Amino acid sequence: MVYSFIVTIALAMGLMLSSESLGLLGNNIGIAGIPFFASILIAVIVHVSTALRYGELFAMFPGAKGEAQFMQKALGSVPAIVFPLCSRVVITVCASTGMLATAGFVFNEVFIYWFPNFAFAFLLLGFLLVINLLGNRVSQKFQVFFVIVALSGLIFLSIAGLLGLENAPSTIKKVTPSLNIRIVLISLFLFIGFDLAGFAQGKNSPYPAGIVKPMVTGIILICLLFYLWGLVSIIYVQQDRLADTTIPYTLTAREIMGQDGRVVIGMVVLAGICSAVNALFIAVSKMIAGMATLGLLPHFLGVCEKRAAIPLILLVTGIAVMIAVGMAGEPVLEVYLRAGLLFWLLNYTGVHLSALIVGISYPNRSQSFRVPLVSVVAIIILSVGFVVLLCTDSESTLLLQFMLVVSVIVSFFGFIWVGLNRKKNLSVSR
């Protein structure tokens, strides 16, 4: 029971510990200053409310196919295909490509200078593929290890920074707060991914407390860590430097401990990337396999559902192709990544909307769904966040074009596949 709880927390925290999250945190602390901490609290409240809905969701429909089954019941088969695929597959392929490339640069610049960047990215991708193919227990144990290393490194650097405050530059006195609606809402991106924990649970896991508690615990722990690291960052590094750099975490670590800090943050970044990519591999491959068993995707994707080897290999192949063709170094990859994050916010909105519909249509299934206020407020905030973040993006046109293309392609596939299955079922029934 304790082991399962620890694994679930590690999966919930995996994506939040990525280099992308640390970079987003540092940049926006640099832009907004101390007031950004209030935005983080708003994001925590929204995501905790969503985690509670996921607890009810997996209580009704346990296992990796639970979310799709829940949406299918409330919204229909096509939305149950579109929402999960557009969000998690886009993030898995695009974010993993970028993060693995970052890992290669970090390894090259901090540890072994002569080692080729992209060679390390491919080696790390292969390593993560192997530990997932070896089975759930192996990948889950590595997930716990990755998270512990990343957490330990950040906490160590933060404490070292607080203990050395007398030697710190007085940058905090020069901070000029600048908070706008985009900065407030962009904090929603920081805690995306807690729901990955639900897809790794077996059908016999204790629900909903077995999912909700570690999800909420993971969100709160990461919130406290972000507060601590954000405070240390703005104390040690000038606000404009934090805002303008792509590696705010490295600047902070170097100011705190010099070259030793650079080595520690290098280990944190590598472990955080591994925790993020591994969590995506574990959860998204199982999600795809679960959807296949529901008939929402081709049947072959659901073969060996527990290990989900075929979806995993397809995801890894997509990432390998992206790295091989040089997409890891293209600015457009950042646009695709933001598209995936916006799709993920839409997916959360879909979960809350499904909860409202289930609460009305199946009143005896769940007591909590009879109180719609939480979901109504969450839907409003998530929808406003989606629109504002899309419209105020520096590449809003390209971002919208990419999202439209992806959603149209997936929706077209969904309509065709659902139609074919319906005809097949009718012919069998006759």
Image (cartoon, rainbow, N blue to C red):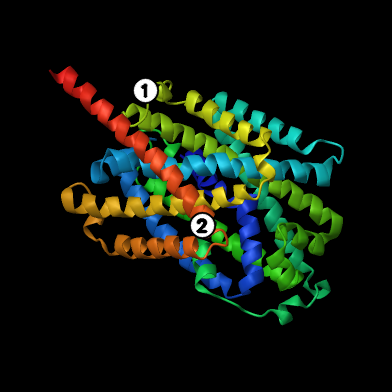
Is there CB contact under 8 Å for labels 2 and 1? no
* Mark 2: amino acid: Thr
**Where does residue 292 sit, x and y in percent of width and height?**
37, 28
In the image, residue 394 sits, relative to residue 70, either above or below, namely below
Q: Residue furthest left?
A: 430
* Mark 1: amino acid: His
Q: Residue at x 20, y 46 (%)?
A: 365
In the image, residue 415 sits, relative to residue 163, either above or below, namely above
> In the figure, residue 239 lies in which quadrant?
bottom right
Q: Secondary structure at mark 2?
A: helix
Name the disc covering residue 188, or none.
Answer: none
Image quarter where the N terminus lies is: top left
Q: Residue at x 85, y 59 (%)?
A: 258
Name the disc covering residue 299, or none.
Answer: 1
Residue at numbered disc 2: 397
Which of the two residues, 54 or 144, is positioned nearer the viewer here? 54
Question: Is residue 407 visible to the viewer in this orientation of the structure?
Answer: yes
**Where does residue 94 sit, x and y in percent of width and height?**
57, 43
Q: Is residue 270 left or right of residue 357?
A: right
> In the figure, residue 407 lies in which quadrant?
top left
Which of the two residues, 244 or 205, is positioned nearer the viewer here? 244
The first of marks 2 and 1 along the sequence is: 1
In the image, residue 381 sits, relative to residue 407, either above or below, namely below
**Where does residue 244 sit, x and y in percent of width and height?**
71, 65
Which of the two residues, 391 or 38, is positioned nearer the viewer here? 391
- Assess disc 1: are there few (<14), some (14-19) or many (≥20) residues with their C-alpha within 10 Å of its C-alpha: some
Q: Secondary structure at mark 1?
A: helix
Question: Is residue 218 visible to the viewer in this orientation of the structure?
Answer: no
